Image (cartoon, rainbow, N blue to C red):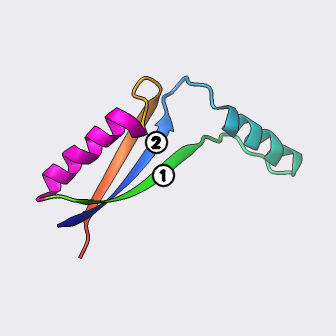
Amino acid sequence: MQYQAKVIIELKVGMLDPEATTAKRALGHLGYDVNSLKTAKLYEIVIEAESLDIAQHKVEEMCQKLIANPIIHNYTIKLQELN
């Protein structure tokens, strides 16, 4: 079976986010009053697995080994079966 995983990678609370700081400042110069801004990355992965649980486990491994840095990132996985 094929599954699609959407993985959202965000910085943990307290980590500096220079990209968001720069974008917030630039938006202010354009006249937008932005109170808060943070960056995140979205990965969309299509994976073959025998079950939803196995697919979840494989994507967790991908995040822990390569996609996210567990010291500075939190990640969320949303998984669905593809028809």
Residue 34's spot in the image, x, y percent? 73, 45
The residue beneath circle 2 is: 9
The furthest residue to the bottom: 83
Dot 1: few (<14), some (14–19), or many (≥20) neighbours within 10 Å? Answer: few
Tag 1's secondary structure?
strand
79 with respect to 57 (left or right): right
Q: Please report the bounds of the magenta region as a residue range.
A: 50-67
60 with respect to 32 (left or right): left
Q: Residue at x 68, y 38 (%)?
A: 19
Tag 2's secondary structure?
strand
Which corner quadrant of the image does residue 37 belong to? top right
Q: Is residue 55 magenta?
A: yes
Q: Is residue 70 magenta?
A: no
The residue beneath circle 1 is: 42
Q: Is residue 50 above or below residue 10?
A: below
26 with respect to 77 (left or right): right
Q: Is residue 10 above or below residue 5?
A: above
| Badge 1 amino acid | Leu
Residue 52's spot in the image, x, y percent? 16, 57
Q: Are marks 1 and 2 in contact (CB under 8 Å)?
A: yes
